Amino acid sequence: MALKTKVRAQLGIPGKKPDGPYDTAESVADDPRADGAAEAEGVRGTEAAGGVADEAPEPKKNWWQRRREVKHLQGTFDAYPHLLALKPKERYLFRSDYFEVDSSVACILAYFHDDAAHDNFAAFWGIDRIPDGLDERVTAIVLEQVRRMDDKWIDAYTKQSEKLERLDASEQEETGTTSSKRKAAKISGDLGVTIGELQDSASYLSVHNRLFLKAPDLATLDNTVDRVTRLYIDRFGTLKAAPYAGEQRQELSGLWKNNEKKKGKGFHFTSTELAGSYSLVTNGLNDKCGEYVGYMVGDVNNSAVLMDVDAYEHHVIIADSTLSEYLDRQRVANMWCSKISQATLLNNSQVVHLVLDGADLDKLGPAFERLTSRVDLNQGDVNMFEMFGEEEDELTVFSAQMEKLKLMFEQLYETTDGAVGSIIRSALEDTATDFYIEQGMWRHNAKEQRHRLRVVNIPHTQVPRLQMFVSYLATAHKALLNSRRTDADQLRAYNVLKGIANAMLSTNGDLFNNHTASAVDGVRDSRRVVYDFSRLMRRGKGVAMAQLVNIVGFAVGKLGLGDTVIIHGTEHIDDRVKRYIQDQFDHMHERGGRVVYSYNDVDRMLVDSDFNKFDAADYTLFGPMRDGTVAEYQKQLHRRIPPDLARLITTKGENLTYLRRGVSNVVFHLDLALGINPYREAQRRRVRREAARAEEVARMDTIMRDKPAPGANLTSIRKHSTGGEGEADDAGQDDASRRNDGKSLRQPENGARRPAEKTRPKKLVKT
């Protein structure tokens, strides 16, 4: 026994498991290597026993133990929550051509094709296999499993097919009918095409298709199957889908099996032929910094639209006449404006709103009270004779001021005689120039006398008002009357100017006869500025346009890279002021500013195309159109749109929006999040409360765990004396900073106990 043990030890073969510790010690004690390694104290046997025990192999597990271990590693459904969501609550109940699962019914359809038929399918015909127009409660899934056949299989079956084709051809010559001959000719032709494509390096593929339908009840499932059958007849004619009778259980269990184990022979394609069946679908918009604005319609892929509304460089066009029933009948176009405004603010840029159509921005999004400044145009917060800008641009600013004054007066006087209008404009510019010279703000030959100009950055109260200009016009008119040589046209021009100025002063003096309000000075530094002209439109369009001309230069004067001007109701802008506004926007574009033109009607947007240039916009967002509008849209765009797209964009009552951006044309169901959902607001408040509670718990936990420092997180416990002594400061302050009459609760440095204070006698109070 000892000899066998030594041999096993020399060969590295572990010995048998001993019955007890003494046998182990005895066996290993005979090992000569153990004798040389151990000392003679008597612990040699114990050490050797431990060494052999470590080398002993674990006992082999029987099949039952291994099966239990595998089951334990696999776990149960309870350990995988995502599998519980897929696991049916009840067992499957299979019928002849459908099966029940939980509260729904489903069936699996296979595809069948007539081999003798000539298909003539269109390119990318595979997308037509996906049914549409089904009930919203129905789920339809097309499963396609492809396997590439190897060269050995191809060679074997090619030779076999050629032999069968020759035999069949000779048989058809003798006993074939017209139908069988036609079928044989079709198969022979397909064989030749297939061999030719294979020789051109194409692959040969085995394809199995299944259509999985799920419905809430049996009646809906039957209607869905009928709908799919009719769709396939219309789209293909030679392809149909039907279930295998009594095979639903086998079909369901074999969905993911290899093709050779599936029921039916399936289809065989070369890679060239299969390429025509690819299911190409649009993917909508997936911008890198996009946010959800709706979901696609009109395509088999109803994917979400993730759009970055702030991803534009120059200008954007919005036109939609739809009213939102959820936001107190606000315009959908203004909803988009609010969305763009929020995106601009999130990117740390400025936004200016010019409201002409009565849009209530507080109903279209958060108020942003800390970021927003509102200029009350109904009270004339900006003096029409004051100029704004930089000192180095004084000459340009004065020229723009002259143009602004002429446009303001034109809005209050309409003439069809171009010659008279030109005389009036010339007389106004001469009079206004002399007026500014007399007020000490301008000089003749201003380029050589820049140091004497007072155009910008002067106190608001030192800028003349309308009443002073009216007096100056009256004086000029009187001097012209008393002149020996009087020009009738010039006299008429001064009569007109005097009448317009008097009307502005008497009727709208609260708008135009004011000094600029001091609150306006900080307006242009706000992140969001709102100029509301809606109430002015009630006074008259001319008054509103005059005020628009008066304010637009001031509003956009400091906008730079990434900043945005949003015009609500652009169709209300008069044609005579558009040139001036466009000039102001051109200067802003040079600094990197952007514009959003919002219209409440698509037709009026197309009429105004010379001003908005919608064909050159970074992107356009349109609501439903009329058939005539679609034709005009294609004409101005110089591009035809597909009939399906034209059908979609003329659909009304579905809350659809048509987006054109570059080469992308997407129609989607609108679903904007504007930050005013009451349910989301309650959720945000709950999150804020939980965050504040967690922060307070963490603070208190820090206070309770950390070693307290003198005076930290504690309140003073010193009683206030009745003799008017001062309050005690925190114990952590320096002694030099303490008040002389205060007392400190800090213990002496040597650890001595503080002596008790003697009780003081109470003061006598005379009653």
Image (cartoon, rainbow, N blue to C red):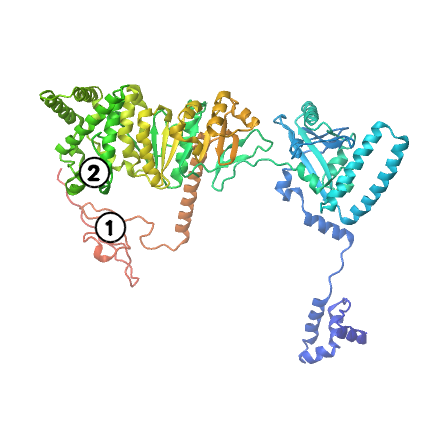
Q: Which mark is residue 236?
A: none
Q: Is residue 280 left or right of residue 192?
A: left
Residue 295 image position (x, y, % from top left): 53, 32
- Can residue 6 be spotted in the picture? yes
User: For residue 547, which quarter of the picture?
Assistant: top left
97 and 289: which is toward the camera: 289
Q: CA distance from mark 1 to mark 2?
A: 56 Å
Q: Choose mark 1 or mark 2, whichever is in front.
A: 2
Please say if 53 is above or below 464: below
Residue 332 image position (x, y, % from top left): 44, 26
Locate the N terminus and report the quarter of the image it occupies.
bottom right
Please say if 534 is above or below 87: above
- What crowding class fits label 1: few (fewer than 14 Cα within 10 Å), some (14-19), or many (20 or more)? some
Q: Which mark is residue 728?
A: 1
683 and 631: which is toward the camera: 631
- What crowding class fits label 2: few (fewer than 14 Cα within 10 Å), some (14-19), or many (20 or more)? some
* Kind of residue sitting beneath label 1: Ala
- Identify residue for label 2: 456
Q: Is residue 535 left or right of residue 197?
A: left
* Kind of residue sitting beneath label 2: Val
Q: Name the residue furthest front.
A: 485
Residue 610 image position (x, y, % from top left): 39, 28
- Can residue 682 be spotted in the picture? no
